[in-house]
Image: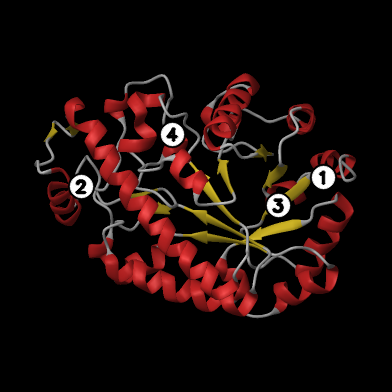
Amino acid sequence: MRKALFVFDTSVDPGQLVSFCTQAGIDSPILHPGFFDDDLFLTALRRSGLKVWMNLPVFFDEGYLNDNPDAYSITSFGNRAAYSWLHMVCPSQDKYIDLKLRQFHNLIKKIHPDYISYDFIRFYVFWEQVELDNPADTIEHGCYCPECQRRYLKFSGERLSLTNRIVERSQRELLGEWKKTVITEITRKLNDMVNEAAQGTPIYIKTIPWKTADLDHGIAWISGQDIERLGSISDGIIPMALTQILGQTSHWKKDLLDHVKATTGKEVMSYIQFEPLIRRTAITNEQVDIEIQTAIKEKRAGLIYFHYEQIMANAEKQRVVVKYRTV
C-alpha cells in the first residue's frame, strides 16, 4: 500500500523528514513548490530513495493576489474569495493561467517528480465549513466577476441571475456545465504541460469531498469539478475526505470513496487526519489507528497522512503511524 505524507512548513529539517518517512514506511512526502526554491529537500529525498510528490496549488496563490487584487474570484455574496488562509484566483484569468503553466513547467522539468497532484483546481468554496445537510443556498462560492458572467453568457446564451445572493435553481445545471468545462479544459492544459516537461509522470486530482448529488449537485455548479471527466484524464482522483473537519463518520467516508471509485473506475487513496481542524472535536490515537485499519481493510490505493507537522508534535500518534510501516 502506498503511503504519502503532506508537509507544509518549508523550515522543517530535510534529514528529520527523511528519517521519519523511512521509519514509518512512507514512500512519498507531498511537497508544494516552495520546497524546491533550493535543492535541499530534493537532494535529501533522492539520496534516501523516497519518491518526490509535487502538489500544485492551481488557483490558490495569495502572493499573486497581493500584487494583482483584481484577479480575485468574486463570490456569490459579492466578496473577494478570501477566507481565513484561503485566497483564490478567478479561473477566467487567462494571464494568471499562462503564468502558472510556465512556472509549473519550469519546475517540473527541473525536478521531474515521481508524482504530481493538482490542488485547488476548482472554483472557490471554503468547503471545510460547509454542512452537507444544510441547503446549498447558504453556501458562499464563486466566481461571479464580470468576466465569468460574460463567459457564462457566451456559453449558455442567457444571463446569470443571482437573486439575494442565490443562483436561480433553474440555472444551476447549465452553470455547472459551464464551470465543469472551464475546469476540465484547464486540467487538459496542465496535463499537456506536464507531458511536455516530464512525460509519463502520474497525475492525481484532489477534489472536494462531496458526492455528485450532494448539495443539489453542488460539486458541479459550485466548484466546477466533474469527477468522471477528471478521472478520465488523470491517473486518479483523491477526495479530501477528512472526517473530523466535516463532522462526519467512517460510514460517510467509505460511501464517498466508494462513490468516486465507482464513478471513475479507479482506485482512490484515503486521507488520515491526525489533529482537529475547523471543529474542536478531538481525534484520539485510537481513532487514527481505526481509520488506518479501515483503509487497509477496504484495500484503498494508499494512505495520505495529514500532516507531518501535526504528527511530529504527538509521540503517541507517531507510534501509530510506525505501527503500519510494513503494510
Under mark 4, the amino acid is Gln
Of label 4 and label 1, which has the lower sequence position? 4
Is residue 59 visible in the rendered image? The answer is no
Task: Work out which quarter of the rendered image holds the C terminus and state it.
Answer: top right
Task: Work out which quarter of the rendered image holds the N terminus and state it.
Answer: top right
User: Picture coordinates of residue 282 (x, y %)?
Assistant: 65, 29
Q: How many angstroms separate mark 4 from mark 1 (CA)?
A: 28 Å
When the figure is inspected, residue 13 is found, relative to residue 308, above or below; the finding is below
The crowding category of the residue bearing disc 2, from other C-alpha atoms within 10 Å (few below 14, some 14 to 19, many at least 20), is many
Foreground residue, 163 or 157? 157
Residue at screen point 85% across, 50% down: 24
Q: Is there a contact, CB below 8 Å, between mark 4 and mark 1?
A: no
- 306 left or right of 180 in image: right
Foreground residue, 10 or 177? 177
The residue that mark 1 highlights is: 318
The residue that mark 4 highlights is: 129
Q: How many angstroms separate mark 3 from mark 4 (CA)?
A: 24 Å
Mark linked to residue 144: 2
Q: Is there a contact, CB below 8 Å, between mark 1 and mark 3?
A: no
User: Picture coordinates of residue 244 (x, y %)?
Assistant: 59, 30
Residue at screen point 76% across, 34% down: 292
Under mark 1, the amino acid is Gln
Of label 1 and label 2, which has the lower sequence position? 2
Q: Residue 160's quadrant in the figure?
A: top left
Of badges 1 and 3, the one in the foreground is: 3
Residue at screen point 26% across, 58% down: 92
The residue that mark 3 highlights is: 5
Name the secondary structure under disc 3.
Answer: strand
Q: How many angstroms separate mark 2 from mark 4 (CA)?
A: 20 Å
